[in-house]
Image (cartoon, helix red, strand yellow):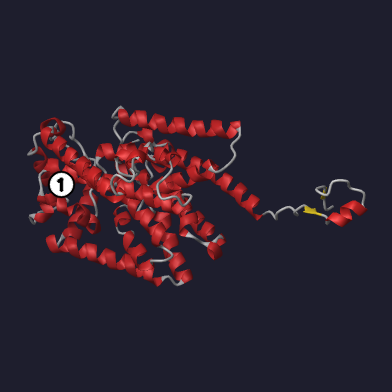
Amino acid sequence: MWARVCGLQPFPQMEGFLPTRILKAVISLFLAVLVVWFLFAHEQAIRSNIKGRDSTLYWATATLLMHGGNPYSIPDVLALERQVEYASEKTEKPKMYRPPPWSMWMILPLGFTSAYWAWVSWMALSMIALVYGIRISWRLYGDGRTNPALIFLLPAYLFAPVAACLVLAQMGTILLLSIALFFFLAEKRPLLAGAALLPAMAKPHFFAPLWVILIVWAVNRRKWLVLCGASAAFLLANAIALTFDHSIFRHYHDMLQLDDLQNEFMPNVSGMIRVLFFLHHFWVQFVPAALGMAGCILYYWRNRETWDWRAHGPWLLIIGALVAPYSWLTDEVALLPAVLQGVVWLSSAKLRVRSQLAILVFVCFDLLLLLIVRAKVDPFTGIYFWSSLVWFSWYWYASSFREKSSVEECEPPLPRQQALPLHLTKRLGFGDARQRWHSP
């Protein structure tokens, strides 16, 4: 029903009354007007509930950049945030992600408006990126139908990192759209595929295995257009940032020095390993990433002859999230193509009771994460560290059903049972001419 209301499907009883495209346009326009009216009518109530969102940090950073200030100055960012009526009174530096210079172009338009409408605009952009990211994933792994199936949509919109990303107004859904576009365009539109990776460069540490394999694959297959597209987009993004702040890279370097990252806890597997066993050894936090990249290189080399980003790329996402030195639950929205690929494998398989129980366990883990997000637990606490382990286990378990289906597809068909001619059946003594002769 909601899909029809949102314009994805027409109502059966209205088919023929209005053309489908006109009906979708009218419904979409009505919903847009309704949303805008709601935002204006309840502006004061909503203002009090968007405290601490990353969109406020993005707005303050973009405002400083547009007015010739230092976008990475913590005191200046805090001063701008205090001017907003719902800003926190704390004086400590914000533990939030500040985009690198080559990602400033994404948040720069937020500086043209107020903090409230910056949140509205960012949320609208996030929702659009989420919807298109899911639809592209359906094009990649679906069964060919125009509209995604319900069994595909439910896991997508109930994916715990999606909720966390929208609550904190983070950029995870934009990372999702970037990765999904790359998988979709890699083979047929290499130049655009490389350019589509620009938003994902906002968090290079999270996609470390993907960058390594991308370079190896481009050199091995001579896909220079992919590297050209990524390089051109990267240089253009840096040029935009340098236009507003000629010293932005020095400011970015100074901010990294002041952040004192080596003494901060990361709520992921690498951070937990370091805290439990190697607390005073910062370099240990990067060991899982190095091992993960080495394993991905071996994985690529074994599949280099048949490498396909649609089929093999999701493994790089899963491994990257598992071994990332820095990551949060909101970043894991980019794993949605891998999660949905597993959903498609399992939905097309004949599941036994044991498999159904295993799927139920994964569903319970996702619901538990949703409850933790609903309880507004600080994302910097260690309660979220195990989320990447769940998605890794899900994809590993679902991939076993893909291997089984591949074996079944490769098995030669059984010989067809052919009927003997009528005169032979009578001569052999078979009374019924329809009797079938089974080949040995």
Q: In the picture, which quadrant includes the N terminus?
A: top left
Numbered marks: total: 1
**Residue at 55% from the left image edge and 30% from the top image edge:** 357
Let me know if residue 169 appears in the view.
yes
Please name the residue that numbered disc 1 is placed on: 59
Q: Secondary structure at mark 1?
A: helix
**Residue at 22% from the left image edge and 40% from the top image edge:** 31
Let me know if residue 73 appears in the view.
no
Q: Nearer the viewer, residue 248 or 194?
A: 194
Whole-percent x, y for residue 335 in the image: 40, 46
**Residue at 16% from the left image edge and 33% from the top image edge:** 46
Please rate how many residues cluster around mark 1, counting C-alpha atoms within 10 Å: few if below 14, some from 14 to 19, many from 20: many
**Residue at 23% from the left image edge and 62% from the top image edge:** 237
Q: What amino acid is labelled 1 in the image?
A: Trp
Q: Nearer the viewer, residue 439 or 152?
A: 439
Looking at the rendering, which quadrant does residue 244 occupy? bottom left
Q: Is residue 304 above or below residue 204?
A: below
Looking at the rendering, which quadrant does residue 30 occupy? top left
On the rendered structure, is 390 left or right of 199? right
Q: Nearer the viewer, residue 429 or 36?
A: 429
Whole-percent x, y for residue 317 in the image: 43, 50
Whole-percent x, y for residue 84 in the image: 9, 38
On the rendered structure, is 353 left or right of 145? right
On the rendered structure, is 79 left or right of 158? left
Whole-percent x, y for residue 83 in the image: 7, 39
